[in-house]
Amino acid sequence: MLRQLNLTREISRWIFMPWQRGAAGTASAEPPALPINDVIVDYDGPDLPLPEYPQRPNEPLEIRKQRLVYQSRKRGMLENDLLLSTFAAKYLKNFNEEQTAIYDQLINGVSNDWDIYYWATDVKTTPAEYNTEIMQLLKEHVKNTERVQRFRQPDLT
């Protein structure tokens, strides 16, 4: 890690501070050479393996629901924080074990929160594996036919 940091610093100096190239005691006139064994990873490639979500087979239902309430509130993007926290506050307490597992897989199995947001708002088509009764319930919740104001997350009880 330190080696990568030093290499990045050298490359940055060479690119962004050209007036220092070749000056005595500073960066050289040539760009630093990349070590042969370093591999540059393209994170936008379609072949990037996604980590599997760890299953918790022995987790009690009430503990799982508490975890899902927390995870619904802390998504990393405000849009999903509001949608999922209000959804969880309204529906999660009445879910049975199977529905809770489906909701768990929905919010934790998808690697990108924007996917959940686009599926719930019908901007993108929901893939078959996530097009469940819980997703349909979430889509109805997002439509907000009751015109409930959702400016903040519900209080924890």
Image (cartoon, rainbow, N blue to C red):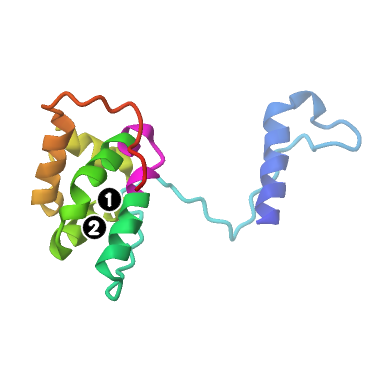
Say if mark 2 contacts mark 1, CB within 8 Å. yes
Which residue, as the protein is rendered here, is positioned at the far bottom?
58
Task: Identify which amino acid the numbered label 2 is placed on.
Answer: Gln
Using the rendered view, name the quadrant where residue 8 is placed.
top right
- Let me know if residue 78 is in the magenta part: yes
For residue 125, above or below residue 46? above
- In this rendering, the count of numbered labels is 2
- Let me know if residue 66 is in the magenta part: no
Q: Secondary structure at mark 1?
A: helix
Q: Position of residue 110 (x, y in %)?
A: 28, 51
For residue 58, above or below residue 15? below
Q: Quadrant of the N terminus?
A: bottom right
Relative depth, front residue between 42 and 131: 131
Q: Which residue is mark 1?
A: 107
Task: Identify which amino acid the numbered label 1 is placed on.
Answer: Ile
Is residue 115 at all visible to an observer of this figure?
no
Q: CA distance from mark 2 to mark 1?
A: 6 Å
Task: Tell me which residue sits at (68%, 35%) in the image.
Answer: 12
Q: Which residue is mark 2?
A: 105
Boundaries of the magenta span: 71-81
Q: Position of residue 42 (x, y in %)?
A: 43, 47
Task: Tell me which residue sits at (73%, 37%) in the image.
Answer: 30
